[in-house]
Amino acid sequence: MEPTPLITPGAVENLQRILRPLARYHRHTVEGLEHVPMTGGALLVVHHSFATYDGLLLGGQIYAHTGRLPTALGDDKLFRFPMLARWSRAAGIRPASPTAGMTLLADGHLMFVAPGGMWEALRPTREQYAVRWASRKGFCRLALRAGVPLILSACPAADDIYRIRASRLTDAAYRRLKVPLPIARGVGPTLIPRPVVLTHYVAPPLVPPPHDPQREAAQVDALHAEACRIMGSLLMKR
């Protein structure tokens, strides 16, 4: 039985109203939707672009194809302000923690994770299509312990929506304060998204081995290496 969606009906309607024109603007398509499981818990692992909304476009296509509404774990900053916290919860986003992730997966939810987080989103344009997951292994540990597959997906052209300038200020602000201070532009000098054609590529499920607590570190490392390899190959499909 499919778990009760965490996103409210009103939020679904609001998101659909936003996503339809965005999908048309970018002529968005998805290749590999058949790899998204129709039932059961799974981690939808995505590459984090600066635009970010490409992940919502993928979620909309998954909903249209499977009838399943993916949920997500969000940064703690989303829940520090009442209005933002209410919007986040209405959209199915929950505060990030291993316990929350295990609960959602055990209940059979599809759960979005972007291992690179904001640090990956802030990559300058000279680092387009790069994976910043070097020390981000929590998603692999979660999948291993929960016994659920990793469904990796990338939208390489999402890195072309904005031009991001390399900046020491950007790097310092994030490393020291975890505050995003990007120098970015879209169409011309504005922040209007560039009208690039977006295609998501979804890889076949990456199924973790049976969890062995005595060998967990080695299992996580191996799963992480394979996830990075697959994501790198998806980002080459541009």
Image (cartoon, rainbow, N blue to C red):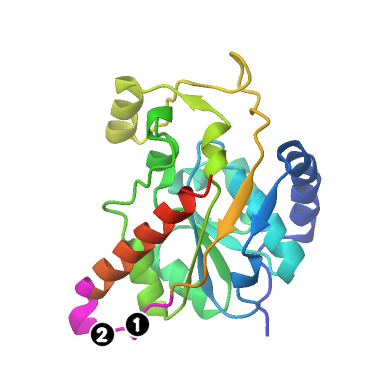
Residue 166 belongs to the span the image colors magenta: no
x then y, percent, for residue 210: 34, 86
Amino acid bearing label 1: Pro
Q: Which residues are magenta?
A: 207-218
Whether residue 47 appears in this view of the structure is no
Q: Quadrant of residue 212?
A: bottom left
Quadrant housing the N terminus: bottom right
Whether residue 44 appears in this view of the structure is yes
x then y, percent, for residue 44: 52, 63
Assess whether mark 2 and mark 1 are in contact (beta carbons under 8 angstroms).
Answer: yes
Residue at disc 1, secondary structure: loop
State whether residue 51 is above or below residue 112. Answer: above
Q: Is residue 4 left or right of residue 126?
A: right
Between residues 236 and 21, which one lies in front from this camera angle?
236
x then y, percent, for residue 197: 66, 39
Residue at left offset 62%, top offset 42%: 83
Residue at disc 2, secondary structure: loop
Residue at left offset 28%, top offset 27%: 172
State whether residue 109 is above or below residue 200. Answer: below
* Most distant residue in the front direction: 237
**Residue at numbered disc 1:** 209
Circle on res. 212: 2
Amino acid bearing label 2: Asp
x then y, percent, for residue 71: 59, 62
Q: Is residue 40 left or right of residue 222?
A: right
State whether residue 117 is above or below residue 161. Answer: below
